[in-house]
Image (cartoon, rainbow, N blue to C red):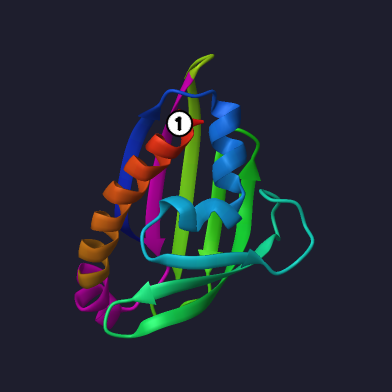
Amino acid sequence: MHLLAENTVEIACPVTAAYQYASNLEHFGQWFPRVVAIRPANDLAHGEPGKVYLETVVIPLRGKRAIKIVVREAEHNRLLVTEGAFPPLLPRMQMQFRALSDQSCEVRWQMFSRNRGVLARLTLIPLARRLVRQRAVLGLAALKRKLEAG
């Protein structure tokens, strides 16, 4: 896998609140740039492996695209891992949550590409890195604002 971006933010809220909000991906568009909409595609609980969402995102030079997102791993108040069916990038998002105190936590957000091809490494990955890094900074700042505002 290729790391595209990562960012960490300290948030003045309990880790339980941060995890509960962020693991419900229906909220993702409220804090992450270029996510137009996201809706559940099955009846599993949020943050449960196998939970499926349909995400509509804005792709530079390509417009809006629908992507199937699947929760692959989840540990309550600790970890959420999703994978998107979006070739050729094949994104994998990881969010790690860590309590710093009763009223503060740290959220580490990472995005990877599962595409291991040489051509992707030379062309797609550098471009995706630039775009996703910008979105990661804006997205985690918005998540912090949203959670600290209550």
Where does the image place residue 145, in percent across and percent down from the top left?
38, 36
Q: In percent of the image, x 60 and y 29: which residue is there?
A: 16
**Residue to which mark 1 is pinned:** 149
Q: Nearer the viewer, residue 118 or 77?
A: 77
Label 1 amino acid? Answer: Ala
Q: Which residues are magenta?
A: 104-126
The answer to whether 21 is drawn above or below residue 67 in the figure is above
Q: In percent of the image, x 43 and y 23: which residue is there?
A: 12
Q: Is residue 67 visible?
A: yes
Where does the image place residue 54, in percent across and percent down from the top left?
60, 71
Where does the image place residue 113, in percent across and percent down from the top left?
38, 66
Where does the image place residue 57, in percent across and percent down from the top left?
43, 72
Q: Nearer the viewer, residue 65 or 147?
A: 147
Query: As drawn, is 134 to the left or to the right of 145?
Result: left
Q: In percent of the image, x 54 and y 27: which residue is there?
A: 15
Badge 1 local density, few (<14 within 10 Å), some, or many (20+)?
A: few
Q: Which image quarter is the N terminus in?
A: bottom left
The answer to whether 30 is drawn above or below residue 21 in the figure is below
Helix, strand or loop for disc 1: helix
